[in-house]
Image (cartoon, rainbow, N blue to C red):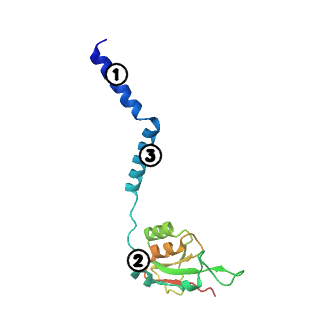
């Protein structure tokens, strides 16, 4: 055994013992955390003009998307016209799982023969975000409250 060989082995063992297993794990977790933060989508600034397309009285709707007196709360339904294209309908369904398509109905929104009446509900998680995302779609002109008769 040469002295150079022994020194190289000794130096390697000293260096590896200084970096403990917990330190290695901590460093690994830090790298994973920083990578995941860097890969997250940044929230775009909300355009307040989008809310002009939503015609609901939010003063009457609580945090769960319900309206009415205690003991008699009900969901608030809303409606809008959607151009009769399957790709648009798929996009709406991704945003709003409560959305129902009513082809051939005009509703209060006055949908034409080339449009589908879409009815959704505020009684869902993050209903305000859902409404904002729907109103942000360029082919949704306005969202109004549905009044059942």
> What residue is at 37 percent from the left and 28 percent from the top?
14
Where is mark 3, residue-wise? Answer: 29
Q: Earlier in the sequence, mark 2 or mark 1?
A: 1
Q: Secondary structure at mark 3?
A: helix
Position of residue 40 measured from the top left corner of the image (x, y, whole percent): 40, 58
Q: Residue 22, percent across and down?
A: 47, 39
Residue 107 image label: none
Query: Is residue 144 visible from the viewing direction of this image?
Result: yes
Res 9 label: 1
Q: Dot 2 surroundings within 10 Å: few (below 14), some, or many (20 or more)?
A: few
Q: Position of residue 119 (x, y in %)?
A: 55, 77
Report how many numbered discs are placed on residues in the image.
Answer: 3
Q: Image point 45% across, 40% down: which residue? A: 25
The picture quadrant where one finds residue 121 is bottom right
Disc 2 vs disc 1: Cβ atoms closer than 8 Å?
Answer: no
Crowding around mark 3 (Cα neighbors within 10 Å: few <14, some 14 to 19, many 20+) is few
Label 2 or label 3, whichever lies nearer to me, is: 3
In the displayed structure, 69 sits above or below 4; it is below
Label 1 secondary element: helix
Instruction: Indicate which disc, 3 or 1, sits on the residue closer to the N terminus.
Output: 1
Work out how far the residue at label 2 is from the one at label 1, CA to CA, in angstroms.
70 Å
Gap in Å between the C-alphas at discs 2 and 3? Answer: 44 Å
Mark 3 vs mark 1, foreground winner is: 1
Q: Earlier in the sequence, mark 2 or mark 3?
A: 3
The span from disc 3 to disc 1 (Cα, nearest Å) is: 29 Å
Provide the residue designation for mark 2. 139
Closest to the camera, between mark 2 and mark 1, is 1
Position of the C terminus by quadrant: bottom right
Q: Is residue 101 above or below residue 7?
A: below
User: Which of the pair 44/3 is nearer the observer?
Assistant: 3
Residue lying furthest top in this view? 1
């Amino acid at each position: 055994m040469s002295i150079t060989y022994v020194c190289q082995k000794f130096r390697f063992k000293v260096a590896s013992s200084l970096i403990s297993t917990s330190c290695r794990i901590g460093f690994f977790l830090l790298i994973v955390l920083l990578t995941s933060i860097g890969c997250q989508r940044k929230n775009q600034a909300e355009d307040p003009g989008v809310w002009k397309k939503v015609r609901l009285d939010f003063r009457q709707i609580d945090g769960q998307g319900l309206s009415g007196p205690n003991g008699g709360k009900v969901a608030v339904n809303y409606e809008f016209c959607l151009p009769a294209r399957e790709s648009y309908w798929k996009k709406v369904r991704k945003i709003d799982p409560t959305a129902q398509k009513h082809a051939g109905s005009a509703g209060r929104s006055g949908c034409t023969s080339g449009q589908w009446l879409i009815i959704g509900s505020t009684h869902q998680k993050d209903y305000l975000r859902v409404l904002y995302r729907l109103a942000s779609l360029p082919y949704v002109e306005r969202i109004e409250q549905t009044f059942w008769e």
